[in-house]
Image (cartoon, coloured by chain):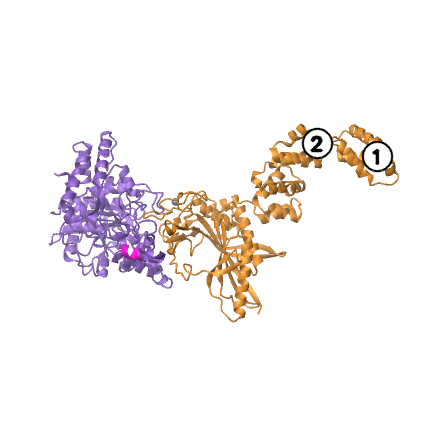
Chain colours: A orange, B purple
Amino acid sequence: MKYQVVIGLEVHVQLLTNTKIFCGCSTRFGSEPNSQTCPVCLGLPGALPVLNKKVVEFAIRAGLATNCSITPRSTFARKNYFYPDLPKGYQISQFDLPICVGGRLDIEVDGETKPIGITRIHMEEDAGKLVHLDTMEAGEKSYVDLNRACTPLLEVVSEPDMRSADEAVAYLKKLHQIVTYLGICDGNMEEGSFRCDANVSLMPVGSDTFGTRAELKNINSFRFVKQAIEYEIERQADILDEGGKVVQETRLFDPASGATRSMRGKEEAHDYRYFPDPDLVPIVVDAEWIEAVRKALPELPDAKRTRYQDELGLPEYDAEVLAASRDIADYFDACVALYPQAKPVSNWVMGELLRALKEDNREIADCPVTPGLLTEMLKLVENGTISGKIAKTVFDEMYKTGKDPAKIVEEKGLVQVSDSGAIEKIIDEILAADPDKVADYRGGKEKLFGFFVGQIMKASKGKANPALVNEILLAKLKG
Amino acid sequence: MELHELTLHELHELLKKREVSSVEATKALLARIDAVEDRVKSFITVTPEEALKNAEAADQRIASGEMDMLTGIPVALKDIFLTKGILTTCASRILSNFIPPYDATATARLKERGMVLLGKLNQDEFAMGSSSETSWFGKTRNPWNLDCIPGGSSGGSAAAIAARQATATLGTDTGGSIRQPASHCGCVGLKPTYGRVSRYGVIAFASSLDQVGPITRDVTDSAIMLGAVAGYDPRDSTSVNIPVPDYRKALTGEVKGLRIGLPREYFIEGLDPEVKKAMDESIATFRSLGAEFVEMSLPHTDYAIAVYYLIATAEASSNLARYDGVRFGHRNQDARGLLDMYMVSRDEGFGAEVKRRIMLGTYALSSGYYDAYYLKAQKARTLIMQDFVTAFESVDVILTPVTPTPAFRIGEKANDPLQMYLSDIFTIPVNLAGTCGISVPAGISSGGLPIGLQLIGKHFGEETILRAAHAFEQATEWHKRKALI
Ligand SMILES: [Zn+2]
């Protein structure tokens, strides 16, 4: 039988706040175990949570950027279960009144735009982590590191609107782009700052009744999302083809084998006994706050792309590449603000700049060639001080030293020669040195024009203004 | 008079005039603890070294002229308050080895003012009880009659005041746990408005109901202690950011024209005749002082106990999940595997009443029962709160008994939880409504046991109930009677 896959994603977005969601401890990654803890995140008796307002602001940002409505009065709830990485025996999360509801993201797959519904976005605290050690002295032991406990997360829950692994990946990439653009998440999937669970089910093509779903966990790259979903589609199709039934369960993705396997134990059939957390007061978000956050929102990728094409007149490809990451777009925007000629800027950013950064494995934020330097250089090209060819030399030097382009041109004597008398003199010398070739050219071997240009540029150490060279040379040869 | 007999404000005057030192007063209290503790068992932990160290520091502070009302005053705290470096058990085996790394806000505020910490007081385990019989560390006795319970859960806090083992104490009140033992032990017990005193560092029983308050010898001391611990705390999101008045200034002795409500639901059949008589006499006293009485109704009173035992147990079932043997507290060392560790540690660590309430609360929150129990209880709670808000539109204070009977005998209700739960019928609605209430001595039964009077105020109406309680105290002698021990 032919099946239609139905996919919904739950994405955990770790927020880039300096401190945890309910205490003042640092959220820094990779410190000594349990060094970033306090009575609150250790769940000591008597300790009480106090909400970090920044987390609410970040949640509102995410909500607005994904077309959600912001709940004017939302509440925290306790999700009760026992596990050693969960110090209080409950996780503070949101349940019936999440901060954002009813949003939408538009994805593009195969040139088609498709809206994906966002059911809700809620705030919650992360758990700690367990470290299992098996040593000769101590035997098998488990240790608890609570540095990560109480780190702020957003959980973004989509509607089951995706119908292929590609759609799921497109949605995930889009969401990733938005949260990194918003500056609320570093987007690092390997370190778990952006992690995804996928609910996957099959139904016969043409049906509108969803099948039983499996929840896939531990898929921490875009590639694995595609792999895991495609594996799962095949696994469920095989079961259904043989007349079996898909079991509702949680399955772990194993990147090594590319397969998912059933995860029995703590995740099974839980009654979390959610109820409103009496230690926290309702989160009241008024229209004024929402407006303030909205005003401070950065321009989002879709809007940027459209603006690059419609207002700056860039080709679709350029707009796509430049808007793909907030850092590149910011760099580009800064350049255009200083030197409002989008296409040359785009050429340089997408060409030399990104190439150099890639070779160097460097982030654009750390680029030695600042937008100020790059645009200074473009101005030197425009006013004829240097040629486009020399500009590449200047760029390499700027990239190495961070020096001002005018200074580089001066120090290295790279100023373009636009004095027609001087150029004429060089041309005369070259032509006089090779009368045979001049005769050949005049006899019809017009390809020799390039040879002469080469000789002239070489003689001028590349500094001769190429347009002038062309013009004068042509005149002399036609002589 | 002996130093341990003095009220807080009396001792303060002597310290201020340098007629006695804090060290002398502290030694007197420690000696008194030594003399009677065997019989009363108010304390889980006595901290004589800490106390003398605090007293010396207080004397220096007094000498330097920077004295607070609390400076040099020997105080003891219910063992529910975290005290940095000092064993804090909540009367449970599961915390029988717990040395906190931080102070509760209430502890810290008293320390800043220069109190002398005598030790930690017994209570019902996790404050779950009305008799102080459920403590892992043994039962506290009523100093007025050692065969009787002192009340609970702050039984140690009340017994220590009645037995003159501390000049002032703090307790907590979730359903009557300050007012009921104060009533049974002839002390003044104040439950402030929810949000008035920080809960930070107070071991949680039921977060939406728990509130910190003093148990003292008289109303003036109660006002002083409340002023010392009240106020906004950024560490407690439910603490309310409104100024703390000088509560002593409210003690004008004036109740002329005060409108006192008598809710008919509280003067019911089955009320002990001696309690009824004490209430009638108290009403007469207030009348003679110029107060006016209004008959009134709190129509949803009947639901209070059921609502309380759903909400309090639901919150408790979650609050007590952190006692899992992983990071602190009792852990069974022979347990095989995680589940076993949880189950055996908790089975050994919690007593029967605590387990009963965890199970009740877990059930109330279970999927399929949540709407019928927890959610419905929350709705009824809103109605109960509304009763009080409406009532306070036409009265200033509500007068009721604190408990239906004087203190019962030890063991009498220990195996009858329902009877035990019913003994809090007059105090529980105040917690559900989140308002304030004070218990003041108002009689002695023929059996020689104290009887208390409850004055309930509106939200943040502490000044009014303190004023009324103080005027009553001035007009009567009950607070001067003492347990003969
Ligand atoms: Zn912390």
Specify the quarter for ligand 1.
Answer: top left
Instruction: Report helix, strand or loop for mark 2.
Output: loop
Q: Position of residue B281 (x, y in %)?
A: 15, 51
**Total number of numbered discs in the rendering:** 2
Q: Amino acid at mark 1?
A: Ala
> Could you say where residue B98 lies in the image, as x and y percent from the top left?
29, 47
Left or right, residue A56 beside residue A374: left
Above or below B165: residue A251:
below
* Quadrant position of the N terminus of chain A in the picture: bottom right
Label number found at residue A385: 2
Residue contact at pointers 1 and 2, CB within 8 angstroms: no
User: What residue span does the magenta drawing correspond to?
Assistant: B344-350
Picture disc at residue A475: 1
Residue B299, visible in the rendered structure: no
User: Looking at numbered disc 2 in the image, what kind of residue is underneath it?
Assistant: Thr
Q: Is residue A69 left or right of residue B383?
A: right
Q: Is residue A50 visible?
A: yes
The answer for which chain carries disc 2 is: A
Q: Earlier in the sequence, mark 1 or mark 2?
A: 2
Mark 1, secondary structure of its residue? helix
Viewer-proximal residue among A274 and B458: A274
